[in-house]
Amino acid sequence: MVGLPSVENREMILKTLLSKEKVENLDFKELATMTEGYSGSDLKNLCVTAAYRPVMKLIQQERQKDMEKKKREAQGKSTEDASETKEEEKEDREITLRALNMEDMRQAKNQVAASFASEGSVMSELKQWNDLYGEGGSRKKQQLTYFL
């Protein structure tokens, strides 16, 4: 049986999971503290959910730009504004994703809960079973002795 990670281990897991992400001012100690009771899988789900937030914001911005562009086209821009439109389109092509921040992690935590309570009845039953029948209990491997 594998228990839930400690605060130090959650911090290391979070650093590992987010090592390839562009992050800004993430306090890994605070994140580890606020994720008490999270398993490694829960932490992964938390990081994935948080990483989607900048993507969703970018999609929202792109939709807004498209709507504004359609409004301008519907209003019929004059030929004088055509050069400005071309410059705007060049700027639109540069898509930059903002860095992941603490607010993203907090919002993700509101969406991703721990998969089970570490002090709940199910967990205590699992610990009891492991003590009786698991590797820590009566099924410990006994050393073989050889007689020469």
Image (spheres, rainbow, N blue to C red):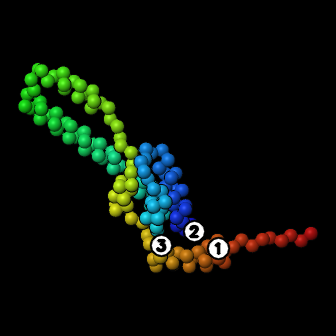
Cα gap from disc 2 to disc 3, whole angstroms: 13 Å
91 lies above or below 116: above
Amino acid carrying label 3: it is: Ser
As shown in the figure, which amino acid type bears the numbered disc 1?
Answer: Gly
Mark number, residue 1: 2
Pointer 1 residue: 136
Q: How far is mark 1 from mark 2, CA to CA?
A: 9 Å
Residue pushed farthest right?
A: 148
Q: Identify which residue is drawn at 52% across, 51% down.
A: 16
| Residues at circles 1 and 2 in contact by the CB criterion of under 8 Å | yes
Q: Which residue is mark 3?
A: 118
| Residue count near mark 3 (Cα–Cα under 10 Å), binned few <14, some 14–19, many ≥20 | some
The front one of 29 and 134 is 29
* Helix, strand or loop at mark 2: loop
The picture places residue 143, in percent across and down from the top left corner, at 78, 71
Residue found 39% across the figure and 65% down from its top: 113
Q: Earlier in the sequence, mark 2 or mark 3?
A: 2
Residue 4 coordinates in the image, percent (x, y): 52, 67
Q: Is residue 49 in sight in this rendering? A: no
Q: Residue at x 55, y 68 (%)?
A: 3
Q: Classify residue 90 by image quadrant.
A: top left
Q: Against 105, is 37 above or below?
A: below
